[in-house]
Image: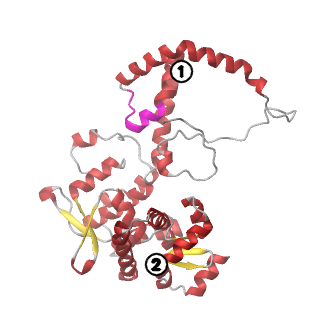
Amino acid sequence: MFTPFVLATTEKIPEMLLSRAIQITMRKAPDPNPERRDPEPEDFEEIREKLYVSRLTYAPEVYKTSIELDKENLGLNGREYEVWKPILIIAKVIGEDVFNDVLDLAKKMIEERKEHLHEEEKLLLHVIGDLFKEKGVTTLEGDKHIEFSASEVLGGLKELLLSDEYGDDEKRFYKDWNPQKIGVRLTRMGIKKYRKGGGKRVYSITYDEYNRLLIRYNMSHLSHMSQEQEEASTSQEGTTKIEKKITNFVEEAKGEKKGEVVSDKCDMCDKFSEKIDTDIQQHQDPLLTKAIYVLQEMGGEAGIPVLANKLRVPEGKLRLLLQDHLEYFVVKGDFVYTKARWEALKTNGNGEEDILGERSL
């Protein structure tokens, strides 16, 4: 079943929901009822009666307009068209001027939204582009490819973001970024992974696949693909804030190599992440699997009440699950950490007492 609904929130809207929504930023307005009374049912009698009549009399025209609209090339594709189609149909029934205004608004809002979608994926593609240059792969010839670990990507992200976005606050950076989170993102992007000798997990991507990802995530202006493939992209106009920031991977080579310390710190995280990925594939408890992935998405640590709320389970049930699976979790009071996150915090110079003291503030 499908139905539209209205969601009012002051929180940041998740990307998965934002891509399915028409976002309207509300502004504070004068009280429509200065007499300070709540609306009564009779206040809506007139508009309700008109809507009943409209539903009975306009249904054939709305249906006919829906079929005709599907045949037009409006410049909207896929989900964008699905989201806006119902409003565009009603606008078309009202009149061409209203329809054109709504269509222009749809295109404008879609372009603005692109700046807020897939920011993390674009950052990862930027770092992967740097890795291609470091390894000397800059053409499509011979289906060339590179191999890299989540730790290497983490090091590249640190170089890119630490000074500008985090003010050199390493603790805050490692709270937002870790190998587990990067691994989940890379897998969702369809980048292949496998295990090399010694059990170390690495990712592999060809230069051709990389360029196709640039097109998929609306970064086609950075792609070296053919002109025909670029024209197939649904985003040919405009440059988002994050895209402007990452054009340097095409224009100039990096000046420094990543520090060895970052990779060393994250080797242990990679090993824990590999064990978790292997174990949960074989595990039959859906709540355990969901808890691991949700906790990883939250940066590897969370308050237990918050995690229980996200999982929509009683807090007591979640605590029992965590205690039964201490091979995956570290529970400290009202906080829970993945094993990899806990080890990463200690590796970064935080003793156990410091970690708990900071979380309790």
Residue 20 seen? yes
Considering only vertical position in the picture, is 245 above or below 115?
Answer: below
Q: Residue at x 45, y 46 (%)?
A: 114
Q: Nearer the viewer, mark 1 or mark 2?
A: 2
Dot 2, crowdedness within 10 Å: few (<14), some or many (≥20)? Answer: many
Q: Tell me: 357 left or right of 69.
A: right
Query: SS of the residue at dot 2?
Result: helix
Residue 95 seen? no
Q: Tell me: 76 left or right of 233.
A: right
Q: Position of residue 344 (x, y in %)?
A: 46, 80
Tag on residue 98? 1
Q: Tell which residue pokes out farthest to the right in this image.
A: 35
Q: Amino acid at mark 1?
A: Val
Q: Tell which residue pokes out farthest to the left in this image.
A: 142
Alpha carbon distance from label 1 to label 2: 56 Å
Q: Position of residue 116 (x, y in %)?
A: 49, 50
Q: Amino acid at mark 2?
A: Lys
Considering only vertical position in the picture, is 219 above or below 6?
Answer: below
Residue tagged 2: 339
Query: SS of the residue at dot 1?
Result: helix
Q: Quadrant of residue 36?
A: top right
Q: Nearer the viewer, residue 72 or 333?
A: 333
Q: Nearer the viewer, residue 172 or 351?
A: 351
Of the numbered discs 1 and 2, the one sitting upstream in the chain is 1
Based on the picture, tell me whether residue 136 belongs to the magenta stretch: no
Q: Residue at x 22, y 66 (%)?
A: 146
Q: Quadrant of residue 34?
A: top right
Q: Residue at x 21, y 79 (%)?
A: 197
Q: Which residues are magenta?
A: 74-84
Q: Position of residue 297 (x, y in %)?
A: 47, 64
Considering the whole magenta stretch, tell me its main secondary structure. helix
